[in-house]
Amino acid sequence: MTEHAYDKEDREAVYRVIAERRDMRHFAGGTVDEEVLARMLAAAHQAPSVGLMQPWRIVRVTDSALRQALHDHVEVERRNTAEAMGERADEFMRLKVQGILDCAEVLVVALGDDRERHVFGRRTMPHMDLASVSCAIQNLWLAARAEGLGMGWVSLFVPAEVATLIGAPAGAEPVAILCLGPVTEFYSRPMLEQESWTSVRPLGELLANNVWPG
C-alpha cells in the first residue's frame, strides 16, 4: 500500500463497479437525468488517449427517426450475422443483441476524421486510436453502472452506413452504438454466459510470465 492509495471503502467501490459492469440488452425505458448524463460524458472525456489525441466523437441521438433507422440497420446486420453463424444461426437469432428502441438514450461513438495527423504513439500501431476510444467507452460504462444505469455496446452494423446516417465526414468511423438507460435489474453474470452462448475464461488461462500463455 502506498501513501497515494484511496481508503479501503473507496478502493472496494472501484473494484465493485468493475466487477458488476454488464453489457446490457434489456432496458426499462425511462429517461436519464441531464446532469447525470453530463457527468458520464465528462468521465468518458477524461479517458486516456495515445498522444492525447482524444479521437472520440460522440453523437447523442435525440431524433426518433434516426433512432429507428439505426435499429433497422442493426436488424439487417443481425440477420446477416446469423447467416454467417452456420449451425448456430437459430440459436443466435434467439439472443437479444440490442435495445435501441427500448433504452432511454442512444449514443453513437466514432473515431474522428482528423486522427491521421496524430503520429505520436501511432506510427507503428495506428489502431491505438481505437484503443483510446475504447477507454472512453469503458469510462462511460463504469460511470453508468455507478449511477445505476445500464449500458450496452452494439457492434452489429456497417460503419460506413452508420456514418451516413449521422452525417459523419469522410475519414470518420463509427465503432459503437451505445444503448443507455434504466434497467429492471443487472445480469448476475454476463448475458452471453447466462444464455449458454459461451463462458468466461479464467484469468489464469490468459496470463503468463515472460512467454506466451499456453
Image (cartoon, rainbow, N blue to C red):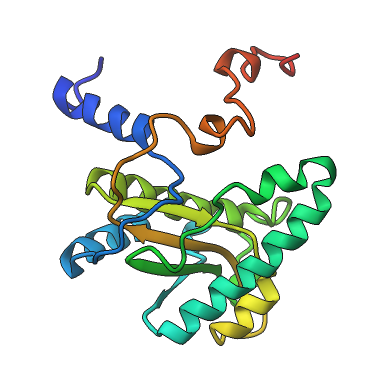
Q: Picture coordinates of residue 113 (x, y %)? A: 60, 77
Instruction: Compare residues 206 and 153 and report the one nearer the observer.
Output: 153
**On screen, 57 above or below 41?**
below
The picture quadrant where one finds residue 187 is top left
Instruction: Compare residues 184 and 165 and report the one nearer the observer.
Output: 184
**Residue at 60%, 26% in the rendered image:** 199
Regarding residue 117, the answer to whether it shows in the image is no
Quarter holding the C terminus?
top right
Instruction: Compare residues 145 and 102 and report the one nearer the observer.
Output: 102
**On screen, 166 above or below 49?**
below
Q: Picture coordinates of residue 108 (x, y %)? A: 49, 69
Quarter holding the N terminus?
top left
Regarding residue 126, the answer to whether it shows in the image is yes
Q: Left or right: where does residue 194 sit relative to residue 145?
A: right
Q: Picture coordinates of residue 63 (x, y %)? A: 40, 85
**Residue at 59%, 47% in the rendered image:** 95
Q: Left or right: where does residue 55 sit relative to residue 123?
A: left
Q: Left or right: where does residue 180 sit relative to residue 100?
A: left
**Residue at 59%, 58% in the rendered image:** 129
**Residue at 34%, 50% in the rendered image:** 150
Q: Left or right: where does residue 43 sit relative to residue 131?
A: left
Q: How many marks?
A: 0
Instruction: Compare residues 18 and 68 and report the one nearer the observer.
Output: 68
